[in-house]
Amino acid sequence: MNRALEFKNWSDGGNNYVLKASANNKWSGFQDSVISKLSIKFGLSFNIVIWTDSDSESDYYCIPFEVLKHLFLDEHKTTGKYPNRWTAVILDHQFLMHSNSNLSIDISSFYGLPLIQEPKFDIEDDFYIENAKAEISIRLGQSKFRKGVLKNFGNKCALTGISEQALLTASHIVPWSHKKEFRGDISNGICLYIEVDALFDKGYISFTDNLEVIVASNRSHFSEELNNKLDKLTGKRLSPARLKKLNLEYLYYHRTVIFKQ
């Protein structure tokens, strides 16, 4: 039996979105409603699990949503007969969005078969647990990085003070997919409420070196609701980190590369 079938699916209360893909190109469809439910319940700490052959024990991918989140944007959804979903294929271990073949990411390190890739891991590396194929079912939310970032901010959103764990995200300042060497550095993480994290991740807000919120200046095309939210955040200041200060170079990277100035 394929090990993917042992993962606790979202419909059973688990933090996994388990899908059977087509055999020829591993085509899958992802419902917006399911992604939204998992995001509300787990933040970014859930997995996309894709399998095809029920008789092959390790023929599956288990991909932390943190790795794919930059692909799952509204503008990348399908249109026409089946709206409100994303579709993708996997070819040569490349996860390709149907809406744009340029939207892709290498997911070979999340494949269940060890003969495909045997990376060398440092046992002390925060992402050893996340990437090691033998342990791929362990939640990203249990990683050393998430725990370290939340602890660094007193297990509260650094901007709103919200403390419900399921609504908190260890948000990367320099995105996870941009700089591998910064992934495990807790000075590259801010504990944020998931709504604030979404604004930060997509560049609608950023932070000055004094930790004050700055918002996008060209906002004429934003909805009234979004502008109202941004107005309320403008000038607010992050709570200071307790154990390790945020790296100002990382904040500068976010302001110059991610932020919609």
Image (cartoon, grey):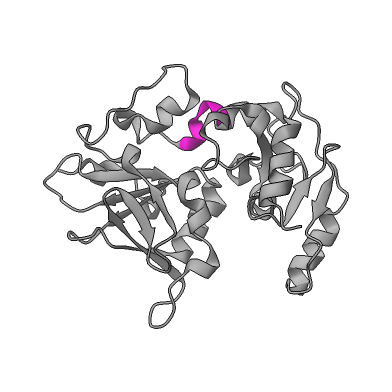
Residue range (magenta): 140-145
Residue 156 seen in the figure: no
Q: Quadrant of the C terminus?
A: bottom right
| Image height of 148 relative to 136, above or below | above
* Residue 142 forms part of the magenta stretch: yes
| Image height of 176 relative to 48, above or below | above
User: Looking at this view, is 105 or 26 the one in front?
Assistant: 105
* Residue 4 forms part of the magenta stretch: no
Residue positioned 49% across, 59% down in the render: 72
Q: Is residue 209 left or right of residue 41?
A: right
Residue positioned 41% across, 17% down in the render: 123
Locate residue 57, reporting x and y percent: 16, 40
Q: Which of the 4 image quarters holds residue 250?
A: top right
Q: Quadrant of the N terminus?
A: top left
Q: Is residue 218 left or right of residue 8?
A: right
Q: Residue furthest left?
A: 55
Locate residue 77, reporting x and y percent: 47, 69
Q: Is residue 2 left or right of residue 45?
A: left
Locate residue 46, reporting x and y percent: 45, 45
Q: Residue furthest right?
A: 235
Locate residue 239, reporting x and y percent: 81, 35
Q: Which of the 4 image quarters holds residue 58?
A: top left
Residue 103 seen in the figure: yes
Q: Is residue 257 left or right of residue 176?
A: right
Q: Main secondary structure of the magenta part?
A: helix
Q: Residue furthest bottom?
A: 80
